[in-house]
Image: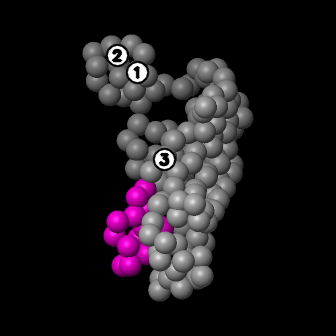
Amino acid sequence: MADLTHFDGKGDAHMVDVSDKAVTDRIAVAEGYVKMATQTFDIISEGRAKKGDVLSVARLAGIMGAKKTPELIPLCHPLPITKVAVELTLDPDLPGVGIEATVKTTGQTGVEMEALTAVSTAALTVYDMVKAVDKEMDIGGIRVLLKDGGKSGRFEAR
């Protein structure tokens, strides 16, 4: 378990001490999707959802999710987030909604969890807003695309 930073030498979970890490600019980008029936896609794309503008509400939910990450994920550090951008794209080939979140900070630890939480929260919000007409939606593909900053350097998904 030595390679897993959230466990101590005894195997007990703990919050990582980042006090010796340098303060650097950090960025993370994550993605995911909500796949749905064509009729549900049409309802969203035509603005006919009874709960309102699905993409706008999901974007705001994603931003809020990123900001609330340390309240949801037990060992995440509260960070001074300097930017959260959540883009939702209608994709007729799924059919569904593609989601991408970018989170930035200047700090001692990265923002991958915030980006992943933003995508997850946005996807769950899309589901919530149209579940009355499609309970079989598929939320998936949630992953980190990019992480940069800090001593571990740059990571880009293949």
- Place residue 131 in its image quadrant: bottom left
On-image quarter of the C terminus: top right
Task: Give the residue pinned by disc 1.
Answer: 4
Determine which residue is flagged by label 2: 1
Residue 66 x %, y %: 54, 52
Q: Earlier in the sequence, mark 3 or mark 2?
A: 2
Spatial CA distance of label 3 from label 2 is 27 Å
Pinpoint residue 117: horizontal percent, then vertical percent: 49, 50
Earlier-in-chain disc, 1 versus 3:
1
Q: Residues within 10 Å of mark 1 (few under 14, many from 20)?
A: few
Q: Which residues are magenta?
A: 122-139
- The reply to whether discs 1 and 2 touch (Cβ–Cβ < 8 Å) is yes
The residue indicated by pointer 3 is 141
Given residues 131 and 60, the one toward you in this image is: 131
Q: Residue at x 63, y 57 (%)?
A: 86
- Whole-percent x, y for residue 116 in the image: 51, 46
